[in-house]
């Protein structure tokens, strides 16, 4: 049985030489030997050259990893793969984050899982994802390296190694069970997305909405041979008790390992306590809608089928779209037109005479009295972020990033290329998937 170990190293800047040294020493200390087909999975959930700069793993982290793999282990088959967020073309985020330039410079393949061949695989341990469409580069990987960006998360408290696995799903399956079952869905993915090595970018971390976060400097690189162990340490650093982080509890209950810190060997040159001291006064916005500084009121309802609060569905979508809009134009949320947003089926009254009330989600409704100047209903289970961008925000005089002309041109351009790549998957010459 492997020894579950987490290494925390001080690293104040994105200096490639320093990062490569830390990575190389960490791999040796963990007793690992990368070989064969290596897949590096970073976090490139979103990026925008103008206002989203810290949602993704810094490309220099991945560049340093590739350097170590080639120079110390002779790995000549290294691929960097990702499936970006919110259904948009990953190649757009590759471009805006600097990953495309990095990959071209060091000559490493950069793939979007949505543009590859896939094989349907059964998940024997899963609660909800009984099958999964697994992209070719992930399916054929013989050594998996996950390189998350440490961030607060609007619904799961933290995002690190386990949450990174949402990005191994193609867009066809990304939103399956992305509702009140999200925590269980995350753990379902471990069956396919169990990395051999995790290297977390915790030099500059993110707070607020994780796809368009506000940066804060932590100055560390965290490494491990166990995804649950490293998330336990990450939770403690961000000020959370692991036994209260839902997806960590779920992982423990399914036998993926203890979430008690005393069962994990922690080494390095900076302590959990020292890093936790840096985060103790941080209040990460958008985790609680009721605490937002805005004249819009929020009513969080349930999924009518399950009776549970749909935290990972429409509530998550609303948090995300508001977080992105306010990051694009700070203050737009504070100055929004008064009104109300109802997510799911709300048990109670919603009284907003003369104001707009938006019902979000197919099952959205109000059990009590509903009074409004105008009621709109945007359906979806969960509702799509693009629909909220296009049809919701302007009703509250919140500026929508969807109408930025420059971004729209880039989106159309990369979407056309993505569509072409998907159509030509069967025609491309590539090794057949091993079954």
Image (cartoon, rainbow, N blue to C red):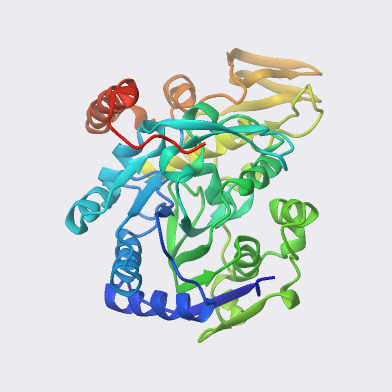
Q: Residue at 26%, 25% (x, y): give it.
A: 412
* Visible residue check, residue 171: yes
Q: Position of residue 335 (x, y in %)?
A: 46, 37
Identify the image quadrant of residue 263: bottom right
Q: Quadrant where the N terminus lies?
A: bottom right
Q: Can you say whether 12 is above or below 120 in the image? A: below
In the depicted view, which residue is nearer to us: 385 or 74? 74
State the residue in front, 271 or 215.
271
Q: Is residue 223 above or below residue 169?
A: below
Q: Residue 425, position in %: x, y?
A: 33, 26
Q: Residue furthest bottom?
A: 269
The x and y percentages for residue 192 are 58, 46
Task: Tell which of 261 and 86 is nearer to you.
Answer: 261
Q: Nearer the viewer, residue 210 or 413?
A: 413
Q: Does any portion of residue 50 appear in the rendered image?
A: no
Residue at 42% across / 52% down in the picture? 55
Residue 58: quarter of image: bottom left
Please give the name of the residue rendered at 75% of the width and 78% of the height, measured from the top-left corner. Answer: 262
Q: Where's residue 49, x and y in %?
A: 26, 46
**Is residue 32 depicted above or below 420 in this figure?**
below
């Amino acid at each position: 049985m492997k020894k579950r170990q987490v290494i925390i190293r001080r690293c104040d800047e994105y200096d490639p030489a320093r990062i490569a040294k830390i990575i190389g020493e960490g791999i040796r200390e963990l007793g690992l030997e990368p070989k064969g087909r290596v897949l590096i999975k970073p976090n490139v959930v979103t990026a925008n050259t103008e206002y989203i700069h810290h949602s993704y793993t810094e490309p220099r982290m991945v560049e340093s990893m590739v350097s170590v793999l080639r120079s110390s282990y002779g790995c000549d088959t290294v691929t960097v793969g990702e499936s970006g967020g919110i259904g948009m073309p990953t190649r757009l985020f590759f471009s805006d984050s600097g990953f495309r330039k990095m990959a071209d410079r060091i000559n490493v393949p950069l793939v979007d899982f949505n543009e590859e061949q896939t094989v349907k695989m059964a998940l024997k341990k899963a609660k909800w994802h009984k099958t999964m469409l697994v992209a070719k580069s992930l399916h054929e990987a013989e050594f998996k390296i996950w390189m998350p960006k440490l961030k607060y998360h609007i619904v799961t408290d933290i995002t690190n190694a386990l949450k990174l696995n949402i990005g191994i799903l193609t867009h066809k399956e990304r939103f399956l069970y992305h509702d009140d079952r999200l925590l269980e869905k995350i753990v379902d993915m471990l069956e396919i997305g169990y990395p051999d090595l995790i290297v977390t970018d915790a030099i500059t971390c993110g707070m607020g909405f994780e796809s368009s976060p506000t940066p804060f400097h932590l100055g560390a690189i965290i490494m491990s041979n166990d995804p649950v162990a490293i998330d336990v340490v990450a939770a403690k650093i961000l000020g959370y008790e692991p036994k209260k982080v839902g997806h960590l509890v779920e992982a423990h209950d399914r036998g993926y390992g203890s979430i008690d810190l005393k069962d994990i060997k922690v080494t390095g040159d900076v302590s959990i306590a020292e890093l936790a001291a840096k985060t103790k006064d941080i209040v990460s916005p958008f985790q609680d809608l009721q605490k937002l500084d805005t004249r819009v009121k929020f009513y969080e309802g349930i999924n009518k089928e399950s009776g549970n609060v749909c935290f990972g569905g429409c509530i998550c979508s609303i948090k995300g779209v508001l977080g992105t809009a306010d990051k694009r134009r700070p203050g737009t949320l504070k100055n929004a037109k008064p009104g109300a947003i109802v997510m799911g089926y709300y048990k109670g009254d919603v009284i907003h005479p003369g104001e707009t009330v938006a019902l979000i989600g197919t099952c959205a409704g109000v059990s009590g009295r509903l009074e409004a100047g105008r009621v709109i209903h945007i359906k979806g289970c969960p509702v799509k972020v693009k629909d909220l961008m296009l049809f919701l925000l302007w009703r509250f005089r919140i500026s929508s990033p969807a109408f930025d002309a420059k971004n729209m041109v880039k989106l159309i351009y990369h979407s056309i290329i993505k569509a072409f790549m998907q159509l030509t998957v069967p025609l491309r010459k590539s090794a057949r998937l091993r079954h």
